[in-house]
Image: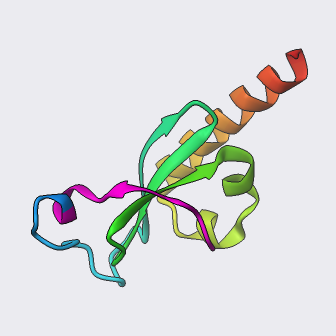
Amino acid sequence: MSYPEFTLFQFHRDGHGSRRDRDALPRILVTGFSGDYMRFHLAGDAWVRDAHVFDAAADDELIAGLAPEDAMKLGIEYERVRQRAQAL
């Protein structure tokens, strides 16, 4: 999984390290959605990363690391983006 860095995770920005080791669950924390992109933090990483909702929904590794409620949010955003793309 290789997604571009968006910004430092807040704890890193504040100089406190990630506070989420690599074994933390959920492994992937969704921090929000912006346009057609999902922003997420991977446990143990310093960065919040961006993934297009279509790419994220197709990435089995990414989906497997999400909490059920985050997977649901991604599904909702996926459908919103898909419907908008069909309308164009």
Left/right of residue 65 with respect to residue 43 in the rendered view:
right
Left/right of residue 29 with respect to residue 2 in the rendered view:
left
Q: How many marks?
A: 0
Q: Against 22, is 27 above or below?
A: above
Residue beneath the point at 61% across and 71% down: 2
Residue 20 x/y as whole percent = 26, 73
| Residue closest to the eye, 85 or 7 | 7
Question: Which quadrant of the rendered structure holds the C terminus?
Answer: top right
Residue beneath the point at 10% across and 67% down: 15
Q: Colour scheme used in the picture?
A: rainbow
**Per the image, is 5 magenta?**
yes
What span is in magenta?
1-12
Left/right of residue 46 with respect to residue 51 in the rendered view:
left
Residue 35 x/y as whole percent = 58, 30
Residue 68 x/y as whole percent = 51, 54
| Residue closest to the eye, 60 or 35 | 35
Q: Against 57, is 63 above or below?
A: below
**Per the image, is 11 magenta?**
yes
Left/right of residue 77 with respect to residue 67 in the rendered view:
right
For residue 58, what is the image quadrant? bottom right
Residue 44 x/y as whole percent = 33, 78
Residue beneath the point at 36% across and 83% down: 22
Residue beneath the point at 70% across and 69% down: 60
For residue 36, what is the image quadrant? top right
Question: Which quadrant of the rendered structure holds the N terminus?
Answer: bottom right
